[in-house]
Amino acid sequence: MLADMHMHTHFSTDSHADMNEMVEQSIRAGIPSICFTDHIDWEFPEEGVVFDFDIHEYEKAIQEARARYGKDIQIGMGVELGMQPQLVCPYMKLLEEHPFDFVIGSMHLVNGRDPYYPEAFAGRSDREVYRDYLEGTLENIKAFHGFDSLGHLDYVVRYGQHKAEEYSYEAFSDVIDEILKQLVKDGKGLEINTAGLRKGLGFPNPHPQVMKRFRELGGEIVTVGSDSHKPYSIGYDFDKAKDILLECGFSYYTQFRERKPDFIKI
């Protein structure tokens, strides 16, 4: 079973999951290594929604989980940062001050709104919103270099009015290629996130064609994540993720410890 490098607990505003229950389910699923990546998404625009947590309490909880379960599973302390250009300096300061094993850089906003909320698509076509999201991703990864792997690249498609009807690699290859080239240039990873499969999208995020193109352009670092917010979905469809990676030309996937990549044969 592949390592699961993307999961959330009650430290994330959008999860109520108990950390111990997440670890126990991972062990039952035969997953050798996990990393908790709870959300920090400063300046999130939705009223009353705050994506932040006490990192000292977070670290304490992970240390306790390591002491309790360390003989059965590796447990990493990560974070998923919601990228915005004005947050580059605050995020870099955060990363300098805390001993994270792994950092996911994710785009959760397009034109100042989370596409999870239908208002993000009001009066606009899916194609228009998707392009804005991808162009925003490119802007952010050019500005922020503190992440290890880019999370769920085409996340926005999960919430489109017509999902993938107006989305393909070919339709957006100009901007997607620029994103992938930037990742390769900066030595960053790309996540294959199986939540797209779980949510009925029909493919993980990003689409396999995007993963294949990343490999063609020289991408080597790929991480695997279920994006689980509840125990039941840990390791969801990892067999499919494994097959996709092999079909795209990857023979290794990556997990991180102390911000250093460890390449593991698939």
Image (cartoon, rainbow, N blue to C red):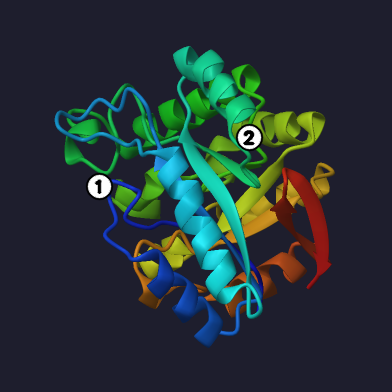
Task: Return the residue at label 2.
Answer: 147
Instruction: Name above or below for residue 39 compared with residue 43.
Output: below
Say which residue appears at 37% left-offset and 26% top-offset: 42
**The C terminus sits in image quarter:** bottom right
Which one is nearer the viewer's eye here, 134 or 123?
134
Among the two numbered marks 2 and 1 on one chain, the one whose residue lies closer to the N terminus: 2
Disc 2 crowd rating (10 Å Cα; few below 14, some 14-19, many 20+) is many
Front residue of 12 and 172: 12
131 relative to 88 in the view: left or right: left
Residue 5 horizontal/vertical position (percent):
59, 59
Q: Quadrant of the N terminus?
A: bottom right
Amino acid, disc 2: Phe
Residue at position x 48%, y 28% in the image: 83
Tell me: residue 123, above or below residue 58: above
The label number, if any, that marks residue 8 in the structure image: none
Residue in the image at 32% along x and 37% along y: 51
Give whichever of 191, 51 is nearer the camera. 51
Q: Is residue 93 above or below residue 3?
A: above
Task: Please give the residue where the numbered disc 1 appears in the rendered image.
Answer: 161
Can you tell which of label 2 and label 1 is closer to the viewer? 2
Circle 1: element type: loop
What SS does tag 2 mark? loop
Q: Residue at x 34, y 48 (%)?
A: 12
For badge 1, the amino acid type reads Gln
Instruction: Indicate left or right for 259 with 227 as reference.
Output: right
Dividing the picture into quarters, in which one does residue 151 lie? top right
Residue 37 visible within the image? no
- Residue 64's x, y, as percent? 50, 62
Q: Is residue 218 left or right of residue 225?
A: right
Question: Is residue 181 toward the left or the right of residue 106 in the image?
Answer: right
Query: What whole-number distance in Å separates the C-alpha atoms at marks 2 and 1?
Result: 30 Å
Contact, mark 2 vs mark 1 (Cβ under 8 Å): no
